[in-house]
Amino acid sequence: MDGSGESAGGSSDLVRLAARLIIEEALEGEAEDALGRGYYARGAAPEAGYRNGYRTGRLKSAEGAIEYSTPQIADRVEPFRSRIRETVRGRTEALEGLAVEMYARGLSTRDIEALFADETGQSLLSRSAVSQITERLWTEYEGFASRDLAEFEVVYLFVDGIAERLHLGQPREAVLAAWGILADGKKALLHLAPGTKEDTASCREFFQDMRRRGLPDPLLVASDGAPGMIRAIEECFPRSARQRCLAHKMRNLLSKVPDDVWPEFQARARACYQAASPALARILRDDIVTTYGGDLPSAVACLNDDFEACIAHLEFPLAHRRAIRTTNLLERLFGEERRRTKVIPHAFGERAVLKLMYAALIRAAERWRGIKITEFDSRQLNAIRLELDRAHAARTAPAVTANITAPQSRLSSKDRT
């Protein structure tokens, strides 16, 4: 494991994030109602005042402190005081419950109006402000899913998915996520989109969409062992190395080895996958096959399956190998989302799931820790790029040669006649 799962935050991050989004959107709606215009709109009465930046508010809750940004309004006849801040401060339990529902099935206008109501039951927000809370995340997601990716110099690309109930009465479907480590060592969320499942067609379309938007060829693409995902990677990124996620592979091996044998088998498998070089990894693999081939044939077959992809990371800089050999970055965040949403029986919807997963991931990405890429590492990576290009040229050369020589043969035949 690369140990970067903690960058996705603790177990209550999703609830705090949802609560923050709800509060901030409500405060924006309250400010627009007070000013009589949107953020960039003009033409309201001068006595309504004008926006004057933001200040940070803090709310204590059972899930921990929630920090949020509060819009400020200046130059009014009467000073602006947010009634929403006072209302929410004493209703953190309702806010947290709404936040969990937000991640389970999206927000309804009735839910939001009930929370942001005063003691008489009068809503503090206009209906238009409530609608903006439910729709702004979808607009953000659509912009994210169509942005130009040419500006990202992706060195390592990672792909993972989570099964979610996107349509009423239908089985769970895959939501695919892609993120990368860039040439400067930073990590960036690149794409999030639904697929029917992790089959070749869905994964191919997912990758082709990123390629159409300018995604360059990464040096390495890491994924789990889903056959459809692997085929799509090999089709769409023929100039890239492919890494099989070792966390998934070790779980596969665990299921095939008896408990009393597992500690030793695990140690030997890890030594193989974390060897100093691919050549040494193959020697250690052969030793495992010799030792366990007779007693544990299914475990040995699992070890041999896609072995070269399991050790692809050993061709890369030593300091990067821990970070690039798994797809663990989103595991904890996805796991927390599953834990919270599975206990709520409401049917999910594609828009609700996508916009809320996007909200969680894009904000978690702001805290992802990158890796250090030194000048020496850069030279190594450039050499790997040249080697991958040469290997790709060698694979495609025979087909090109055959197409060129065929017409020449026909011409020679004519000349002879």
Image (cartoon, grey):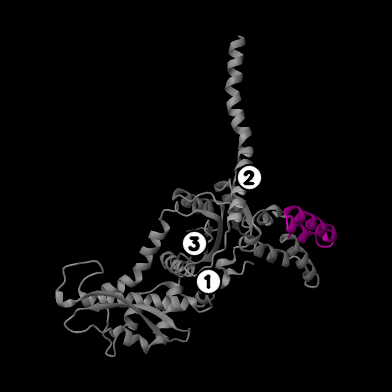
Q: Which mark is residue 387?
A: 2
Say which element carries label 3: strand
Span highlighted in magenta in the image: 275-304
Residue 42: where, in percent of width, then height? 19, 67
Residue 157: where, in percent of width, then height? 55, 56
Q: Nearer the viewer, residue 337 or 171?
A: 337
Q: Residues within 10 Å of mark 2 (few under 14, many from 20)?
A: few
Position of 93 relative to 269 (above/below): below
Q: Residue furthest front?
A: 375
> First in sequence: mark 3 or mark 2?
3
Which residue is the site of mark 3?
Answer: 188
Residue type at mark 2 is Glu
Residue type at mark 3 is Ala
* Residue at screen point 58% across, 58% down: 374
Q: Which mark is residue 8?
A: 1
Say which element carries label 2: helix
Write down the quadrant of residue 49 in the picture.
bottom left
Residue type at mark 1 is Ala
- In the picture provided, is 39 more to the left or to the right than 100? left
Residue 126 visible? The answer is no
Alpha carbon distance from label 1 to label 3? 13 Å
Position of 211 relative to 291 (above/below): above
